[in-house]
Image (cartoon, rainbow, N blue to C red):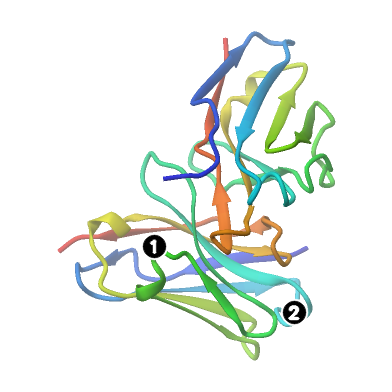
Amino acid sequence: QSVLTQPPSASGTPGQRVTISCSGSSSNVGSNFVYWYQQLPGTAPKLLIYRNDQWPSGVPDRFSGSKSGTSASLAISGLRSEDEADYYCATWDDSLSGYVFGTGTKVTVL
Amino acid sequence: QVQLQESGPGLVKPSETLSLTCVVSGYSIGSGYHWGWIRQPPGKGLEWIGSIYQSGATDYNPSLRSRITISVDTSKNQFSLQLRSVTAADTAVYYCARHLYIEPMDVWGKGTTVTVSS
């Protein structure tokens, strides 16, 4: 059972903006960096956002991350069909002394 | 370019030990990052298994701690996972990955599927 809560699904039409939330607590999101991953079917997770709001090389700026208190968010603007995937947040949990992942959000492009 | 590649048996019998190796290329394993294992049961989310740090120290998921050993072989630039007394609940895709201290993973292997069945 994950300690980071995400909505199970999100959807939008091409070109729209979709936002995914990641809700945690003071021992995880509230005190550590949040990373976001995109997982296409049958593939490994790919890093999208690191340190709350930073882009790795090669990731388009249509993807953006933010954090406030014990919640973080991933926004996808200019939604494209290739953005259909599962998205996960992750961070370190000081109480558990380990990494925790979000429950995952499936994004559908209508 | 850093690459990680998991290897190991795809089928393990119940009660036996699952052993996987992750070979790292393009980066020296002792140079400053840390190394972890993550798994994903079929149709489910990601679960951190454990990590080994540059110092050789380890952190394990409390729910798996009694059954896990993670070790590193710097001479072969690889690290390994042993999971003992497996059951069907351990069936999953197993990923190895790189990370900084208390920061999540930045580079992942492609994953290897392990099925626990007699």
SS category of the residue bearing label 2 = loop
Q: Earlier in the sequence, mark 1 or mark 2?
A: 2
Q: Position of residue A22 (x, y in %)?
A: 62, 34
Where residue A38 sits, quadrant-wise, is top right
- Which mark lies nearer to you, 1 or 2? 1
Tell me: A83 left or right of A3: right
Question: Which residue corresponds to mark 1?
Answer: B63
SS category of the residue bearing label 1 = loop
Residue A53 lies, with reference to residue B20, above or below; the image says: above
Q: Position of residue B83 (x, y in %)?
A: 36, 72
Q: Residue at x 60, y 34 (%)?
A: A23
Q: Residue at x 60, y 40 (%)?
A: A24
The label on residue A52 is none
Q: Nearer the viewer, residue B101 or A10?
A: B101
Q: Residue at x 80, y 26 (%)?
A: A62
Question: Which residue corresponds to mark 2?
Answer: B28
